[in-house]
Image (cartoon, helix red, strand yellow):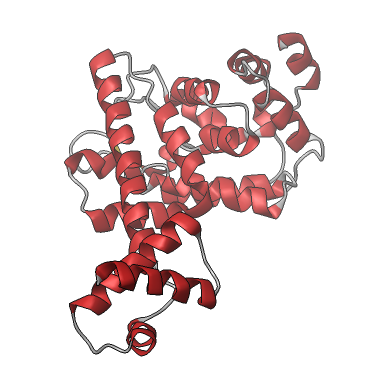
Amino acid sequence: MAETAATNAQPTTGPVDEVDPGAGERLLALLLEPDCAPGIWASVDSGEMDYLVPELLALRMEQDPIHRHKDVLSHTIAVVGKTEPEMTVRLAALFHDIAKPRTRSFEHGGVTFRHHEAVGARMTRRRLTAMGYDELLVDDVAELVRLSGRFKGYADGWSDAAVRRYARDAGPLLGRLNHLIRCDCTTRNREKAAGIQAAMDDLEHRIAELAEEARRAAERPGLDGADVMAHLGIGPGRDVGRALTFLLEVKRTEGDLQRPDLEARLDAWWVDQA
């Protein structure tokens, strides 16, 4: 792999929009290797990455006090190597910390990288667009980068509304976002790593529970209260509520039935009540 990377290496020249037309394919070839980390390092060391993703090289000089790697580049490549070989996730992993050099600050006590995800999403979009990637892929990768830091506050306690907002904002990218976040944990502290994975397990469990609650709350039986009263010849009262509960259970177990079938089930249920 190192020999191939050296052969393809070219210097970085011109603005971001001036990109070798084969750069996008070459980057994906590196990223989609099952064990991609050695190839990425070879590309970095040979100079090839200078023209593929020149922004990435700035991470080599950026110290990473959070993940305790010698630099953010080491952390980034470790994250990419942990992800499944799927281009959206691996591109997002490659770019998820791309804006740290631009957002580094010492103003708030120690080094911080405030809003680096939002800045990184814009940098990602520009670079991937220049490399000729499909617009939908660019959108998805940039959105994963933008959302990649959202989970950091979960340990402080999220309300159900915050959990719903996280899932809603991620939309169809939820599974890939959660996978990226799990892989973003590269600490050598086993206890801390286990805690992060447990927190993500808890978040995913809560998302599933809240989704099921929402699904059940949105369900409606095939007949409404007025239909039940008219069909059974009864007025408002507990029996109407009990009938609707019965019809809702019919829908959950048997799906949507035609109105005559529902009325027949309702009649049989009403007879049993008598």
Whether residue 25 is visible: yes
Task: From the viewer's perspective, tell me whether residue 149 is left or right of residue 238.
Answer: right
Q: 109 left or right of 136?
A: left
Q: Position of residue 266 (x, y in %)?
A: 39, 72
Q: From the viewer's perspective, is residue 1 above or below residue 106? A: above
Q: Quarter of the image containing the N terminus?
A: top right
> Which of 105/165 is in front?
165
Q: Is residue 174 above or below residue 10?
A: below
Q: Is residue 102 above or below residue 260?
A: above
Quick check: 120 left or right of 46? left
User: Residue 133: where, in percent of width, then height?
Assistant: 72, 46
Instruction: Write the residue at 32% across / 13% down.
Output: 188
Count numbered badges in the picture. Answer: 0
Q: 221 and 195: which one is in front?
A: 221
Q: Residue at x 69, y 24 (%)?
A: 30
Q: Is residue 120 visible?
A: no
Residue at (38%, 81%) from the top-left corner?
Answer: 224
Give the residue displayed 53% in from the left and 77% down from the top. Answer: 260
Report whether 31 appears left or right of 182. Answer: right
5 or 272, which lies in front?
272
Residue 68 is situated, as x and y percent measured from the top left of the image, at 32, 19
Position of residue 213 measured from the top left corner of the image (x, y, whole percent): 31, 56
Image quarter of the C terminus: bottom left
